[in-house]
């Protein structure tokens, strides 16, 4: 059966070049970078080269890169590590649409006495900059705002947010897990202090992430132990995955144009095909100002999870909202914050493409999806009128 993978915001296939780059580090180059013998020295050389490659991808300096295990760890290290440095500052500003790796952490901190302000979004998924300005207080330790939303792809204007936060002398953390590899990130021009990445969202394996920490940013380590990562993240370096992530960053840097010239048009063709073949559906989030790979569509009168299961029968992998919410029967907090009605939230499907998708993939989805929606609507009590 044909298989079409359009769930790349959940995870991406590992690029073959990344696998190839990693393989020697499971064999010949197995050394621990902390060892002073030749095996350790080889590992050091490759970790150093990888750090340089990742920093070049971000427009950063190598000593500003901290390798972690995932995006969640990077977010925890940024937020907890900042709060630890400012014990008298007990206020955090974030948004209502962050990934659970930030949102649930902030809720957890709120239970432990921190004041948390969650900025609202409008129906397009945009922040109100005046609300951000008003939220900042003398005891604000940190602002944590994502670059691109994982469910809708909507981009936040970090370039406008950063100067507002920085003129108040507040630390700014940005979760760029979904943005990395899809939009150009140049930290030499973007004054964020801390920024999170995750390897498995950009065709590297699961189990590797990055925390960018601008030189001079106060940061207390989340993991304390050895002196790895300049004391900012203890634990023996995951050399194969660090090398793999560097290769993935190199490939992502080279294919940024492809996101705009190929992935975007494929996503647009998918949306236009869906909108013309299926009535009573709407695209969630600002259609202009979003990642070129993501489409979040609500289909009136259906249950999104059922559609996803039917699509799966045809070999098509998509998702409803955040992947880690799958199987959890609560409507997406992101769509809820945007004021999408509950019925439309339950009827939403997220398609997230990558540079590995083709026009034939889109044709196949457009062939399979309309009959699935029509069938589900037939059995739905409050179904919208039949499509012609
Ligand atoms: N932040 C965002 C925006 C995400 O989309 C994800 C994963 O979906 C994460 C953080 C968590 O990353 P990881 O799965 O590497 O922990």
Image (spheres, rainbow, N blue to C red):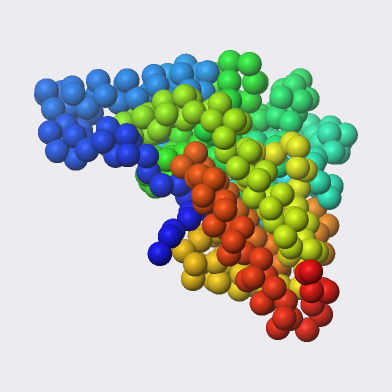
Instruction: Return the residue nearer the eye: 333 or 182.
Output: 182
Residue 339 sits in quarter: bottom right
Residue 340 sits in quarter: bottom right
Seen at 58% across and 64% down, the residue is 368
Q: Position of residue 12 (x, y in %)?
A: 45, 47
In the displayed orientation, state which residue is furthest to the front: 388
Question: Does 100 sit left or right of 302 as displayed?
Answer: left
Instruction: Return the residue nearer the eye: 20 or 139.
Output: 20
Seen at 39% across and 19% down, the residue is 52
Could you tell me which quadrant the N terminus lies in?
A: bottom left
Up-down: is 74 above or below 2?
above
Seen at 79% across and 74% down, the residue is 386
Residue 23 seen anywhere in this rendered image of the structure:
yes
Q: Position of residue 220 (x, y in %)?
A: 50, 33
Could you tell me which quadrant the C terminus lies in?
A: bottom right
Up-down: is 281 above or below 122?
below
Instruction: Return the residue nearer the eye: 368 or 230.
Output: 368
Up-down: is 301 above or below 127?
below
Question: Does 118 sit left or right of 260 as displayed?
Answer: right
Q: Position of residue 310 (x, y in %)?
A: 55, 72
Seen at 59% across and 30% down, the residue is 261
Instruction: Return the residue nearer the eye: 137 or 69.
Output: 69
Question: Does 134 sit left or right of 125 as displayed?
Answer: right
Residue 232 seen anywhere in this rendered image of the structure:
no
Q: Position of residue 257 (x, y in %)?
A: 56, 26
How many marks can you see? 0
């Amino acid at each position: 059966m044909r298989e079409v993978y359009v769930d790349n915001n959940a995870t991406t296939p590992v690029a073959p070049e990344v696998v190839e780059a990693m393989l020697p580090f499971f064999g010949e180059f197995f050394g621990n970078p902390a060892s002073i013998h030749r095996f350790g020295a080889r590992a050091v050389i490759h970790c150093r080269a990888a750090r340089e490659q990742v920093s070049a991808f971000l427009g950063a300096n190598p000593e500003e890169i901290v390798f972690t295990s995932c995006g969640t760890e990077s977010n925890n290290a940024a937020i907890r590590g900042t709060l630890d440095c400012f014990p008298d500052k007990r206020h955090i500003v974030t948004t209502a649409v962050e990934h659970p790796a930030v949102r649930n952490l902030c809720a957890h901190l709120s239970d432990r006495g921190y004041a948390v302000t969650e900025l609202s979004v409008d129906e397009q998924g945009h922040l109100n900059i005046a609300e951000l300005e008003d939220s900042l207080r003398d005891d604000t330790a940190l602002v944590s705002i994502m670059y691109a939303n994982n469910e809708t792809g909507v981009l936040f204007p970090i370039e406008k947010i950063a100067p507002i936060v920085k003129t108040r002398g507040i630390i700014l953390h940005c979760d760029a897990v979904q943005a990395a590899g899809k939009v150009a990130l140049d930290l030499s021009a973007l004054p964020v202090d801390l920024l999170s990445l995750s390897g498995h969202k950009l065709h590297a394996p699961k189990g590797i992430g990055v925390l960018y920490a601008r030189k001079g940013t106060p940061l207390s380590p989340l993991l304390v132990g050895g002196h790895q990562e300049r004391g900012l993240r203890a634990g023996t370096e995951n050399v194969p995955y660090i090398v793999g992530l560097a290769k993935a960053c190199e490939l992502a840097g080279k294919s940024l144009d492809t996101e705009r010239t190929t992935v975007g048009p494929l996503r647009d063709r998918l949306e236009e095909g869906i909108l013309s073949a299926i009535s009573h559906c709407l695209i969630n989030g600002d259609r202009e100002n979003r990642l070129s790979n993501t489409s979040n569509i609500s289909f009136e009168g259906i249950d999104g999870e059922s559609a996803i299961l039917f699509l799966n029968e045809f070999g098509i992998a998509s998702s409803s909202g955040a992947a880690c919410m799958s199987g959890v029967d609560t409507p997406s907090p992101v769509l809820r914050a945007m004021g999408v009605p509950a019925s439309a939230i339950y009827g939403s499907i997220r398609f997230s493409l990558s540079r590995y998708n083709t026009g034939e993939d889109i044709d196949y989805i457009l062939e399979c999806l309309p009959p699935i929606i029509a069938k589900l609507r037939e059995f739905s009590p409050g179904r919208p009128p039949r499509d012609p």
